[in-house]
Amino acid sequence: MWLACSKLMELREGRPAEVPAQMALRSPKAPPRDFASALDEWERRKEYSTPGGERYGRTYAKHVRTELGGYKLSEFLPPDGADRLLAYRSGLNGAGMAPNTVANRLSIVRQVLIFAHQRLWLSALPAFPTRPRKRPPQFSWIEEAHFRAMRVKLYEGIAPAQLRRAEGVTDDVSAAIHVERRRCYFSWLFYTGVHTADADNCTGEFISLDMGVYRRRNSKSADCVPDEWFALPEPLADDLRVLQKALGRPFYGDEQIFGGPWPSVARQLTVAAKRIGLGKVNPQILRRSFAREMLKRGYTVNDVADMMGHVDTSMLRQIYARTPRPPGSGKSKWTRSPVPAQVPGAVLSFPEKASGTGPALSLVPEHAEHTERTLNSGNATVTVTKKET
């Protein structure tokens, strides 16, 4: 800057001055005429805050260059430019791309066109297509009657010889014990709401049937969420006693009660669900079913967050906490079901043992409405609740 001012002063005083070529006010390079050249220049000047963001940005820029690089910048001028961008978005949607993928590509296009407009390569900006409204999250769950029916159907019709590949299975007796361990694995997911990784590593140290308590561990948040003891639901305690009877002894402290890691648990859940007329059921649906049951029993969002090992209550308030409960209802235990467990599609009426009364916590804003619809057909249904504004 000082050098440029000195040269201007020399010119004003009539003295000869030689302006270096690099001080020219306009770049000798001609402005780009096509979208690909503008994208290259934008990418050269783009600064990313993280290496991961740079990796994703360059990947999307590469795809956009392939798809729109042959167009001239003038083809994006209004009003035809808006139609071209809409056609581009329709093509991405027609290719079956995820909404986030479409939005990221359109974001690259938007940044490049704004970059070109700021440098006067583009005289006007087109109207950019608006992002479609995000669909409200869906909260899927199953009733306890459905779960009990699924549990019975696990490994139904399988020959003991087919279970010989499992670790520790050598004869028909050990095969029957293995099946009972896996059924208790299902029960542990449904009645405690833990992740499969925590069920994989559950040992006898996590359960005290005599005291009626279990220790909840969330390995995903172990650094900030300590282990905590909670009351053992009665149906889960009954299932564990059946397993102990099959073993003929109490659980050992270092024993993997449920048979160790189960990589195919999601597939086995879906197989058992289809046998009773349900659709796809995964461990996450069992976790959400636990949250719903606890909220139905009068527990607050903070209580359920502690039981599930959540770091905070944001996830519960956004997705899980959509189960209305009567005002003034108190907490109640998860007692044994009065309905036979083998009846798929039965509607349970859980006995309530009020431990106190008081104003209920409002889990949903007053302006929100809730509708329920059923998925799949057959004797049993999976209920889905979604928020409508």
Image (spheres, rainbow, N blue to C red):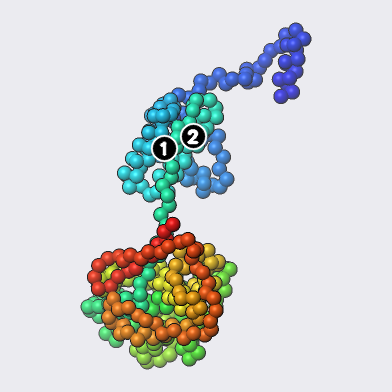
Residue topped by disc 2? 112
Numbered disc total: 2
- Looking at the image, residue 232 lies above or below residue 19: below
Q: Position of residue 264 (x, y in %)?
A: 34, 69
Q: Nearer the viewer, residue 150 or 256?
A: 150
Can see residue 143? Answer: yes
Query: As shown in the figure, which amino acid type bears the numbered disc 1?
Result: Val
Question: Callout 1: helix, strand or loop?
Answer: helix
What's the residue at 74%, 23% (across, down)? 2
Say whether marks 2 and 1 touch (CB < 8 Å).
yes
- Looking at the image, residue 22 lies above or below residue 223: above
Image mark for residue 2: none
Q: Position of residue 226 (x, y in %)?
A: 57, 74
Question: Callout 2: helix, strand or loop?
Answer: helix
Query: As shown in the figure, which amino acid type bears the numbered disc 2?
Result: Val
What's the residue at 55%, 27% (across, down)? 119
Crowd class of label 2 (few under 14; some 14 to 19; many from 20; radius 10 Å)? many
Of marks 2 and 1, the one in the foreground: 2
Residue topped by disc 1? 64
